[in-house]
Image (spheres, rainbow, N blue to C red):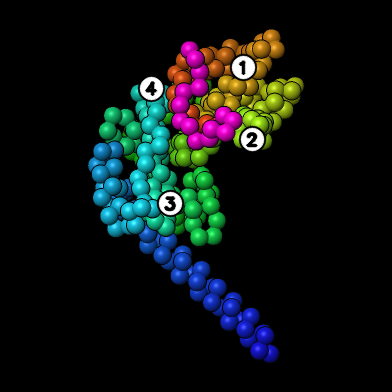
Amino acid sequence: MPIIRMILLLLVFCCIGKVYGQTIQQAEFNKLGLIVKEERSVSRLTKRLDTLLKHYMPSRSQVVKNIHRPLDVGFYHIRYQVSYWPMNYFINMLVRNDSVFMLTAYSCEDLWRKASDYKDAPEPLRLYQYDSVGASTFLRLRNRIYGSKKTLNDLVNELSANTMYAMNCGFANQLTSRGKYIHALIEEENSFPEIARMLQHLLPEEQAYGVTAIDILLKRGVDIDDRNYLLYQHIRKRNTAVYNCFGCLAGLVEPLYNN
């Protein structure tokens, strides 16, 4: 009987601890949410994020702009990694000049699991907002270039994916799981629909995998259809910075192509 009572008490304490931890997480995320919901200017948002740092442990808290790169038709992608110890967040923005046209913010490390992408974060610990005119203009112009049908929902989820371009990475520069997938893909009888999906993706890292697939096919002398080849050329010429890993160097953000 005492053992059963002890087990029940432990279960109760675990439940209380989890609820308390989630309450703290929600309260902290709400502080961030108040700021990002109010600001439509990159410079003002950055200033307010920096100001909030003073409320947290300085040695373990920081606001880092780890991505600022051109996408298409004059729009840029900015990603902040925000650490307000002990919480960590990602903020992704579609911007033009100093104006924010789409923004997502989410907790990337809660007490119970990690979320690398916006869609993986618990709903109470993520948010998005957009300027319907600006975001729709970007999508309309971009869809025309890529022959795609991207929606606002695609914009939110694809641009907020924390994907790394890594064909060969780590010890001995081994082929990664994604690298193995690309090599298996090009052996398929009709790989072009999947390659087209990658090339049309809103995230440059995903596009880079599509470019690599075509690079390999071209070296083999395979004919590429006009649509995929035009997108391939466009992405290589744009040559925007990509979050990548080569060998033991992981987390670099730099252009991939020597045009």
Q: Give the mark nearest the N terminus, 4 or 1.
A: 4
Judged by depth in the image, the label closer to the viewer, 3 or 1, is 3
Disc on res. 73: 4
* Real-space CA distance between mark 4 and mark 3, rounded to the nearest whole angstrom: 31 Å
Foreground label between 4 and 1: 1
Q: Is residue 1 left or right of residue 54?
A: right
Does 165 appear above or below 81? above
Looking at marks 4 and 2 on the same chain, the residue that comes earlier in the sequence is marked by 4
Identify which amino acid the numbered label 2 is placed on. Phe
Q: Quadrant of residue 181?
A: top right
Marks 2/1 in contact by CB < 8 Å: the verdict is no
Q: Percent from the top left, x then y, of residue 124?
A: 45, 57
Q: In the drawing, what numbered circle is on residue 215?
A: 1
**Residue type of the residue flagged with mark 1:** Asp
| Nearest-to-viewer mark from 4 and 2 | 2
Q: Are marks 3 and 1 in contact (CB under 8 Å)?
A: no
| Quarter occupied by residue 174 | top right
Q: Which residue is mark 3?
A: 88
Whether residue 210 is visible, yes or no, is yes
Q: Is residue 192 above or below residue 118?
A: above
Question: Could you tell me which residue is drawn at 57 percent across and 33 percent down?
Answer: 248
Q: Residue at x 54, y 60 (%)?
A: 112
Q: Secondary structure at mark 4?
A: loop
Helix, strand or loop at mark 3: strand
Determine the secondary structure under disc 1: helix
The residue shown at (37%, 38%) is 65
Mark closest to the chain's N terminus, 2 or 3? 3
Q: Position of residue 171 (x, y in %)?
A: 64, 35
The reply to whether the C-beta atoms of the residues labelled 4 and 1 are less than 8 Å apart is no
| Residue on which disc 2 sits | 171
